[in-house]
Image: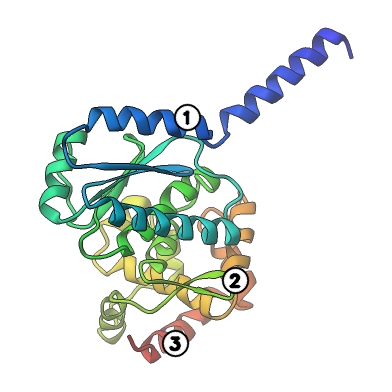
Amino acid sequence: MTTRFLAAACLMFVLQTTAHAAPTKDELATRAKELEKKLDGQGFRVLVEAPFVVIGDESLAKVKSRANFVRWVVRLIEADYFNKQPDKIIEIWLFKNETTYRKGAKKFFEDEPNTPYGYYSPDDNALVMNIGPGAGTLSHELVHPYIEANFPSAPSWFNEGLASLYEQPREREGHMWGTTNWRLPGLTKAIKAKALPSVKTLVSTTRDGFYEAEYDSYAYARFLCQYLQDHGKLRDFYKKFAADAKDTTGQAALEAVLGMELSAFDAVFQKWALSLKR
């Protein structure tokens, strides 16, 4: 191998490595200063909480507490699932109520949100949310940029299912733990009405099919992830699913960790779901 080839190969390795590196401390600090200048006099606080920059229109103490929550979520989801941090600077815009949230989305992103809670905009590299109702939306939305960085081919059911699992998070023995939340009635209603499609149908749903489903697809995906979590199978499922490029829906990984075909699992899942209480 020639010296020139070695040099070229090393350069390519460096470029490939840095192209996917998380933002540096200096890059985050620079962005924070830019935002402070841009927002001067408008009532915002700007803090760096790697790998994010947090912007909030509450008091400094409150925004610091929000940043601490981000740190806690990031620590736990990285430990359980994600080897890579987002490879771009992502801003977390936290508005104190729905009014300032909608005004801010329009003013800073030319957006009119279709949700009163919040969303992740990959195009704007921003999480934009109404933090007034609580931090559940924040922990939900934090999952999306990590899925984008680590498992970009993940189908919508898993992307939204895992994110929704952590809308009411706890820490249990050093792991993130999603507790049964407000989405349960949407699932049990469909089960009792015999309107819930099979698990195989859920995991095979296209992106548009998921977001436009006639049943509560968020609740279904969320509680499928909770079933896996509660039975000690979620992290193993994620590792198998993300590692198998041929398993585009997650069916193979699910059947492997469950030890049964999905057709047999439907009844097991529904019985478990109906036994849950908030």
Q: Amino acid at mark 1?
A: Glu
Disc 2 versus disc 3: nearer the observer: 3
| Above-or-below relation of 133 to 110 | below
Q: Residue at x 23, y 42 (%)?
A: 44
Secondary element at image label 3: helix
Name the residue carrying label 2: 255
Mark toward the start of the polypeptide (1 vs 3): 1
Residue 257 image point, x, y percent? 62, 72
Quadrant of the rendered image containing residue 164: bottom left
Residue 208 image point, x, y percent? 31, 51
Crowding around mark 3 (Cα neighbors within 10 Å: few <14, some 14 to 19, many 20+) is few
Name the residue carrying label 3: 272
Quadrant of the rendered image containing residue 238: bottom right
Mark toward the start of the polypeptide (2 vs 3): 2
| Above-or-below relation of 188 to 217 | below
Nearer-the-camera pick, 241 or 48? 48
Nearer-the-camera pick, 199 or 20? 20
In this figure, which colouring scheme has been used for the structure?
A: rainbow
Q: Residue at x 32, y 66 (%)?
A: 217
Q: Amino acid at mark 2?
A: Glu
Quick check: 172 left or right of 1? left
Q: Amino acid at mark 3?
A: Trp
Quadrant of the rendered image containing residue 157: bottom left
Name the residue carrying label 1: 27
Residue reaching furthest to the bottom: 275
Residue 29 image point, x, y percent? 44, 33
Q: CA distance from mark 2 to mark 1?
A: 43 Å
| Above-or-below relation of 47 to 31 | below
Quick check: 125 left or right of 173? left
Residue 221 image point, x, y percent? 40, 67
Q: CA distance from mark 1 to mark 3?
A: 47 Å
Q: Residue at x 46, y 60 (%)?
A: 73
